[in-house]
Image: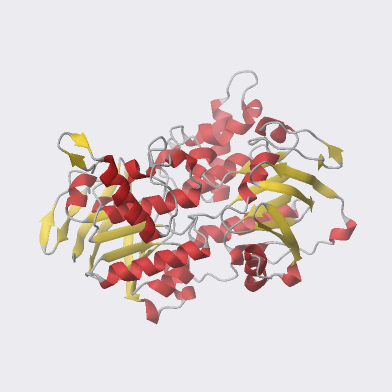
Amino acid sequence: MTIALSFHDVAKAFGPVQVLHGVSFALQPGRIYGLLGENGAGKSTLMKIAAGYEMPSGGELHIDGRPVHFSGSRAAEAEGIVLIHQEFNLAEDLTVAQNIFLGHEKKRGWLLDDAAMREGAAVVLRQVGLDVDPDTKVRQLIVAEKQLVEIAKALARKARLLIMDEPTATLTPGETERLFQLMAQLKSSGVTIVYISHKLDEVERITDEVIVMRDGRFVARDATAKLSRQQMANLMVGRELSDLFPPKRSIVLADSAPLLEVQHLTVPGWAEDVSFEVRAGEILGFAGLVGAGRTELFEGLLGLRPHRAERVGIAGRAVHIGSPRDAARHGLTYLSEDRKGKGLHIAFGMTENLTLMDLARYARPWLRRGAERAALKAAVAEFGIRTGSLSLRASSLSGGNQQKLALAKVLQPQPRVVVLDEPTRGVDVGAKRDIYFLIHKLAADGCSVVVISSELMELIGLCHRVAVMRNGRLQTTLAADQLTEEALIAHATGTH
């Protein structure tokens, strides 16, 4: 089961853009490595080379001391190297079992052995703690369940080197704990694990060593026990990083009228009789476990799901919202947690994505390419989007830079009410700080901001109040002086 992998002066260029510069380090069998770095540092690109999805422009890989050259991911999997992508790599219209064995189908003679694949899928699904029928279509699963299917798929490949890119981004605390137990079992059997994450508390807890990359280069390596989270963050960004959250603005809620009022909103099957309000200048958080109905509640509010409400008011005026277009017309915008599936058109260019929600400003009556390009230049500077060219497609950006582009896109129409669903999912610590200060600025400029997040410290550090949902119902709303991790977890789990 063991494997020793080493990188020797590995370089990678995409056209004129050099993303890896002579990276060299080795991975030993049976250890868990935390691979850290800001978005654009080259982590995912390097691991895609290791897993056969990309070819290096220079240098080579060695496995157990011998040089290897992978023609594709199947060749890497034959050596026991499996990558769990940050963005899901699943066929939505196939079943869970079919996805787990896709490309590795079990056969009985000339025919597919569906029974054997269902049985094999059930085994790995139990390992990751996912209780779904193997015959369920993947499109019927929620995001967290899809993540567990990706992990189960990797286990079915009998990995000797397992690369996990942000595997807990959508998981509940219980699911994350189950994953960590599974990783410990794999490690004890000799499997090497590379764990890419921006959640430094998780890296601190489960890894043996930390490897840090910056600007496409290897910069540091040390035993995890020797580094504090602050030291890890400083190594990633190359400077001291403090004051992650901006100071909360003083806002007297009783003296300001609600900018957004929602009374008795129901989204059938997901949320029941939810009422809340957000004032100008306020940041309201929404906490809850995966499946609590937070995302679906706001998809209903935006007209993306069937819903009914006694009243929805914006700036004191009752409005009817039947579609995202209606919402945008009334000054309400929403950033989806699924940036690849719903937030961006990744096959489009950066410019087309940025201006898509506000085309009227750039087409009078013909599309003004110069104005669009100027807007993109401004967004790249304001949001810190790392790109070698303004002409790239969105699919060419790293996950974190895609998130920044998606955020810039929804803010183009200059909305008054902004709903951000998991705004820092898959974003490095330096970019998180940038986004937190941007959210703070939106509130300071008079917007109402709603932040849906699974990161409790994010809600505590950013928000004036936090609403907690459980099983589709609003349990309570906590004021800033009541916000603790213990209180939020207690209300979210019903143990309060």
Colour pattern? secondary structure
Quarter of the image where one finds residue 409: top right
Q: Is residue 469 above or below residue 489?
A: above
**Residue situated in front as seen by the camera: 133 or 466:** 133
Q: Relative to residue 446, is residue 345 drawn left or right? A: left
The x and y percentages for residue 382 are 58, 49
Give coordinates of residue 139: x percent, y percent: 46, 39
**Quick one: which residue is furthest to the right in this view?**
255
Residue 340 spot, x, y in % from top left: 47, 41
Residue reaching furthest to the bottom: 226
Quarter of the image containing the N terminus? bottom left
Q: Residue at x 58, y 45 (%)?
A: 407
Relative side of 356 to 100, left or right: right
Q: Is residue 451 visible?
A: yes
Residue sitting at 37 percent across and 76 percent down?
Answer: 224
For the question of whether residue 447 can be seen, the reply is no
**Relative to the observer, which residue lies in front, 126 or 250?**
126
The relative height of residue 391 versus residue 422 in the rendered view (above or below) is: above
